[in-house]
Image (cartoon, rainbow, N blue to C red):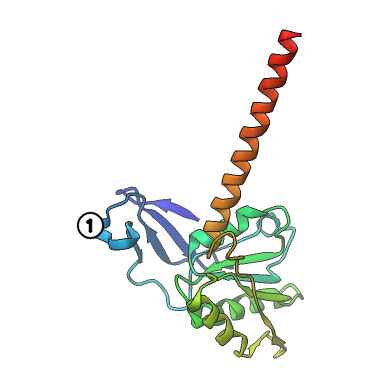
Amino acid sequence: MIEQDKFGNALFLWRDPETREIKGATKQGTWINHEKFGKRGTLKRIEPNSTYGYGFSFDSIDITQGKGKPENIRFFESSIDALSYYNLNPTKLTNTRFVSMDGLKKEVVASYINLTAKQLTKSGSRLKSIALGVDNDDAGNKFVEKMQKYQARDIDGNVLQILSAQPNTKYGKDWNDVLKHVSQVQASTLKTRLAKQHIQRRELQLS
């Protein structure tokens, strides 16, 4: 799903979810240069000739193992956010497809609803849920509000409700912020536990 170019940039490949054909790619820089790349500090762009309506996507492990079906779709503003959301609880996120829109793009939502619905029809299944894991900020909130008015339908014409899967701003405005917060808490907890174990061993040696 992810490759590296000769300059060390990460390439998030846009593969068709069914045929696995490469439809495009998002390039993400891995070195910081604010003078060249502005406030963001790193290169980020969609590669030329990438197919309209597609984006970086991947399925939960049960689907890749042939044990599940993409009955749920989660949409994100970036590839990093999609991966962060999945890594927060990979064992509980099953039968799910994760899609990056590279921004806030209605056409990507519509495209992947159609692609996934058609794929599921072949196995006698249908979409069960659609949710937007976009940033919890003004732009993200407006996009959720707009998309919830959009009448998404499955292959049989049934209306599909679009839900919000935005992060709690207490932990960050996007899912990568949340993952970093959780990682810091876990690291701090581990450090405390190791310190206690060290003290206990010292006490045993002194007794």
At a point 59% along the width and 69% down the height, the residue shown is 133
Using the rendered view, name the quadrant where residue 154 is placed. Answer: bottom right
Q: Is residue 163 above or below residue 193?
A: below
Judge by depth and name the residue closer to the eye, 13 or 106. 106
Q: In the structure shown, which secondary structural element does the residue marked by tag 1 occupy?
A: helix
Horizontal relation, residue 200 to residue 26: left or right: right
Q: Residue furthest left?
A: 35
- Circle count: 1
Horizontal relation, residue 140 to residue 8: left or right: right
Q: Quadrant of the C terminus?
A: top right
Q: Position of residue 56 (x, y in %)?
A: 49, 65
Judge by depth and name the residue closer to the eye, 138 or 166. 138
Q: Position of residue 61 (x, y in %)?
A: 67, 55
At a point 31% along the width and 62% down the height, the residue shown is 39
Horizontal relation, residue 25 to residue 110: left or right: left
At a point 60% along the width and 66% down the height, the residue shown is 167
Binning the other alpha carbons within 10 Å of mark 1 as few (below 14), some (14 to 19) or many (20 upward) gives: few
Q: Position of residue 138 (x, y in %)?
A: 49, 77
Residue behind mark 1 = 35
Q: Is residue 31 above or below residue 126?
A: above
Judge by depth and name the residue closer to the eye, 158 or 202. 202
Using the rendered view, name the quadrant where residue 188 is placed. Answer: top right
Q: Position of residue 142 (x, y in %)?
A: 52, 82
Q: Amino acid at mark 1?
A: Glu
Using the rendered view, name the quadrant where residue 26 is placed. Answer: bottom left
